[in-house]
Image (tube, rainbow, N blue to C red):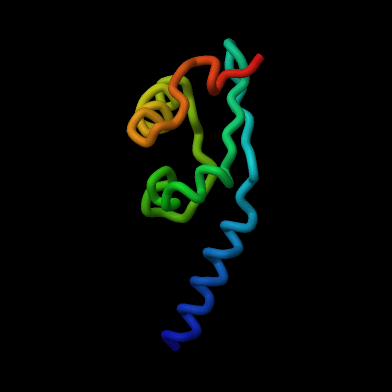
Amino acid sequence: MKKIFAAVALTLVFAVSAMAADSVVYPAKNGNVTFNHKAHQGKNECKVCHGDGAPAKIAINKEAAHGKACKECHAAKGGPTKCGDCHKK
């Protein structure tokens, strides 16, 4: 029974990973922000952004993007932090 549960869990994890969008565009007044999911996937575990629950699309607003969700992580890990690095018109 444990082997069946483990097989189902692994299948679910791989299915969710495969379904994740390669990129997501967040509209913004000063230029849209394109989030490259594949690039971030290789640098962090899913739970860093998605929490302990099953991975799902994250609702990002200006406060989150300029805070813990994006900019603070970029500053800590050497990612882009200037406005024009993320916002493209």
When the figure is inspected, residue 37 is found, relative to residue 13, above or below; the finding is: above
36 lies left or right of 47: right
Q: Nearer the viewer, residue 53 or 46?
A: 46
Residue closer to the observer: 11 or 82 = 82
Outermost residue toward the front?
Answer: 78
Q: Residue furthest top?
A: 30
Q: Residue at x 50, y 50 (%)?
A: 42
Where does residue 88 sit, x and y in percent of width and height? 62, 18
Residue at the image point whose x is 46% and y is 86% from the top: 3
Image position, residue 67 (x, y; %): 36, 25
Splitting the image into 4 quarters, where does residue 21 fall? top right
The N terminus appears in which quarter of the rendering?
Answer: bottom left
Residue 22 x %, y %: 64, 44
Q: Nearer the viewer, residue 24 or 59?
A: 24
Nearer to the camera, 67 or 87: 87
The quadrant of the image that shows the C terminus is top right
Task: Name above or below for residue 89 compared with residue 81.
Answer: above
